[in-house]
Amino acid sequence: MEFKKNIALRVGSGALKSRLLKKLVSNYGYWLGGFFTEELRSGGAREGFILKTPRGGSELLASTKIISQAVFNKYGVNLSALDVLGTQALAAARKDGKVVLMDELGPLTLKSEKLAVQALDALGSGEVPCLATFRKGAKTFEEAFLKMDNTMVLDLDEKTFTEVESVLNGWLEFWIRELGSR
């Protein structure tokens, strides 16, 4: 199978995406860089999001308890999490020749201009492969990813979960071999 440099997952369910990313980080964490998000919950209610790195870095990204000029829906956004942890994680992944993970590219993570520039540069560069996720229905991102010749867009839902997981495992194994031989 011929693999493209990037994969963009069009996600309908945050729970499915989280389940898949946890498996990938667990199985391929050494070869992954970048960031992913996890929901912050209390008593069953979502209170915000945490930005995490495969290396164990973590910072509160958005919360109903944060007061900030940057907001996303009902959440105040901690721009420092994006500007510092997010951009450093992307830069380190590229420098170290890791597969770049960029979860939840969209209005929340792109509140940071620094992160947006890094993300676009990583996706367009020939350096390292990127795995990005975006919400189903985010037309701007969908159209951008579909126009990128070096990017395969996959739909993640209940029906496609096993197939997408299999494709991602094969894609990661391919790139691990490629990056390891450099």
Image: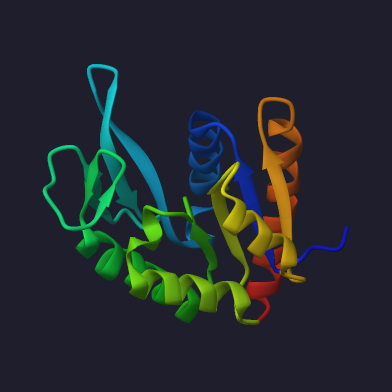
* Residue at image coords 68%, 78%: 181
Whole-percent x, y for residue 140 in the image = 58, 58
Is 30 left or right of 39, judged from the image as shown? Answer: right
Outermost residue on the right side: it is: 1
* Looking at the image, residue 2 lies above or below residue 166: below
Image quarter (top left, top right, bottom left or bottom right) of the N terminus: bottom right
Rendered image coloring scheme = rainbow
Camera-side residue: 163 or 56? Answer: 163
Q: Quadrant of residue 43?
A: top left
* Residue at image coords 63%, 69%: 129
Q: Quadrant of residue 137?
A: top right
Whole-percent x, y for residue 48 in the image = 26, 38
Is 60 left or right of 176, judged from the image as shown? Answer: left
Image quarter (top left, top right, bottom left or bottom right) of the C terminus: bottom right
Is 125 left or right of 43, judged from the image as shown? Answer: right
* Looking at the image, residue 76 lies above or below residue 95: above
Total numbered circles = 0
Whole-percent x, y for residue 176 in the image = 65, 65
* Residue at image coords 77%, 71%: 149
* Looking at the image, residue 96 lies above or below residue 106: below
Camera-side residue: 52 or 68? Answer: 68
Camera-side residue: 33 or 138? Answer: 138
* Residue at image coords 66%, 31%: 157
Whole-percent x, y for residue 27 in the image = 55, 46
